[in-house]
Structure formats: structure tokens, C-alpha cells
Image (cartoon, grey):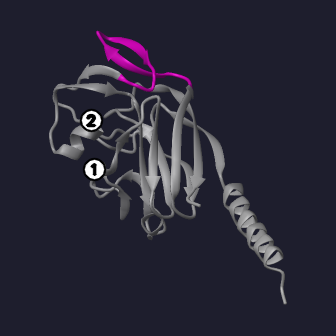
Amino acid sequence: MTNPKSVDGKFLLVGFLMAAASIARAETVIVSVPGNALGSFGNPSSSSQPYVSAIAINGPGTLTVKYISGVVTDCCINSATFAVGPGGVTYNYAGLQSPFQEALGVSGGTIDNADGLVGIFVIQSRVLSTGFSPVDGTKSLVPVGLLPGDIRFIGRGTIFEAKQAGTLFLGINDCCGGGNGGEFTVSVTFVPVN
């Protein structure tokens, strides 16, 4: 007859090893997001670059994004270049359109987080679709792209709850990249669901 304590001990050991394997998949990456990573949202310009692929995950979990350092430079408040942190700056877009305004179908006016850090989590099946590129998918630039309604403000940090496999893309909340420079450096930590 099997000793119940040794059976329980084996189950505890197996349970511990399974938990350790799950924790071992946790990962932190450091990502640089250039000031012109606008993803062609708003009013795209030729100097606009796609959003940056920060991390691809293979299952559900939590993605924590934290600003580490850096500034984005832009022009032209009163015809001068300015530098801004990940929270952005208050700016009047006049007749232009920011990515968040595009998502709402409006343009112009003052927004509070121009040039701030933003992100989009895209499920794996969309990322793997033929012709996918991390740019605005509503302007017929690519067969499959990012959707304005999925953009989230990150600023100094936020948490994405991923319900399935996918990729987190990071960018800048601006409409025109011609005068943009600098970059934000951020950490992205993935912790899988146990």
C-alpha cells in the first residue's frame, strides 16, 4: 500500500515545479521608443515610423509598462523646439488630428498628452495576419494594421491585462513626425497567469 504522505509529497513537488515553470516564463525587456514612432496615426507624414514591437507573449498574463528615461523633442510651440516627458504636453492641434482624436472621429482643439507615451496590445491572430504592420490600419496603408480605438495612454506607466497571446506595441501620441526627435526608454514586464 502506498504511504499517503509520500503521495501527497509527490503532488506538492509536481505542483511546485509547475508553478516554477510558469514563473520562469516571466520576462522584462527594455525598449526604446523613438519620437517619430507615430504609426501613421492622425495626419501621417513620411517621417512617421511604425509603432515599436515591445514584447510578444504566448498566453494570458499581465504586462506592466514603466517609463525609465528620455524625452521626445517636437516643434513648434511658438516656433521653438520643446522637449516633453512620457506624460505629454498640452497642445492645440488646430485643424490637425491626434491619434486619440482619430479614434473618436474628431480633429483640432487642445489635448493634454501630445507627444506622450502610448501603446496597443494586439492579439496574436491579427499580428500573424498576412500583410500586418504596426501602423494605422484604417488608412489603407497596409492590408492589416493597428486600430485607433485600441490605443491606450501609458504616460509614466500602466498595466495591460492580456487575455491571450499577442504583442504589445508602443508609440508616441502625435500627428506629425517631421519635427520629432529623442526617445523614451521603458521597461515592459510580462507575468503569465499561473
The quadrant holding residue 96 is top left
Please state if 144 lies on the left or on the right of 24 as rendered: left
Magenta span of residues: 69-88
> Does label 1 or label 2 sit earlier along the sequence?
2
Q: Is residue 185 above or below residue 145?
A: above
Please state if 88 lies on the left or on the right of 51 as rendered: left
Please name the amino acid that badge 2 sits on.
Answer: Ser
Please state if 37 lies on the left or on the right of 10 as rendered: left
**Any mark on residue 46, and which?**
none
The secondary element bearing badge 2 is classed as: loop
Q: What residue is shown with label 1?
A: 149
In percent of the image, x 52 and y 42: which residue is there? 64
In percent of the image, x 45 and y 48: which residue is there? 160
**Any mark on residue 98, and which?**
2
Overall secondary structure of the magenta section: strand
Say if residue 51 shows up in the picture: no
In percent of the image, x 35 and y 38: which residue is there? 45
Q: Residues within 10 Å of mark 1 (few under 14, many from 20)?
A: some
> Is residue 16 a member of the stretch shown in magenta?
no
Label 1 – label 2 distance at C-alpha: 12 Å
